[in-house]
């Protein structure tokens, strides 16, 4: 039979893990991409953001501090982020190139900002951007 598991019960991590597992299927050099991106995702999304109070991770902070234009769960936010990331990396895939880790960090930062911020009104985008600046400053990236 089929077992149904709600996306809200499953969470975002299996979606990201599946995306990562499929990257090397594109071509062998994508494994190097996965090796760079996986810890960057963890740094952004699994770690507790600075000055985040009771929030356990970035998703939890967002749930507590920003109001989306429409309701959506973590699965939708991570899918938006991964779609943006896939599109942003397409030229590197087409050229079979692996850019520097800093390039991946910048691309991923942009994709997370818009994956999460795309469903926000301008005032909430400012709140999200302020938290992004705190995270970047704490991790010594501006």
Image (cartoon, rainbow, N blue to C red):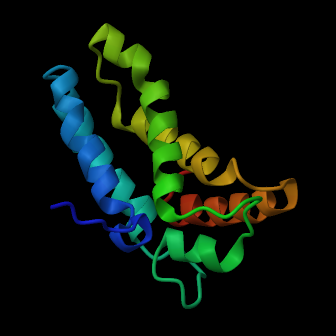
Residue 45, x across and y down, in percent: 44, 63
Residue drawn at point x = 44 percent, y = 41 percent: 82
Left or right: 18, with 119 as reference point: left
Residue drawn at point x = 54 percent, y = 49 percent: 112
In depth, the one of 76 and 59 nearer the eye is: 76
Left or right: 75, with 100 as reference point: right
Q: Is residue 14 above or below residue 103?
A: below
Residue drawn at point x = 44 percent, y = 70 percent: 8
Left or right: 66, with 92 as reference point: right
Residue farthest to the top, as pictured: 95
In depth, the one of 23 and 71 nearer the eye is: 71
Residue drawn at point x = 50 percent, y = 39 percent: 106
Quarter of the view holding residue 47: bottom left
Quadrant holding the N terminus = bottom left
Q: Is residue 11 above or below residue 106?
A: below
Residue 66, x across and y down, in percent: 71, 70
Residue 91, x across and y down, in percent: 42, 14
Quarter of the view holding residue 124: bottom right
């Amino acid at each position: 039979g089929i077992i149904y598991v709600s996306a809200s019960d499953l969470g975002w991590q299996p979606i990201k893990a599946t995306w990562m597992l499929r990257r090397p299927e594109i071509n062998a050099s994508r494994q190097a991409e996965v090796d760079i991106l996986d810890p960057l995702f963890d740094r952004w999304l699994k770690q507790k953001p600075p000055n985040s109070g009771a929030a356990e991770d970035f998703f939890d902070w967002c749930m507590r501090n920003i109001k989306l234009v429409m309701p959506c769960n973590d699965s939708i936010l991570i899918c938006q982020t991964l779609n943006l990331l896939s599109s942003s990396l397409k030229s590197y895939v087409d050229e079979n190139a692996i850019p520097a880790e800093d390039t991946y960090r910048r691309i991923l930062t942009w994709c997370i900002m818009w994956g999460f911020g795309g469903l926000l009104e301008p005032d909430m985008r400012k709140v999200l951007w302020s938290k992004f600046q705190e995270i970047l400053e704490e991790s010594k990236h501006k």
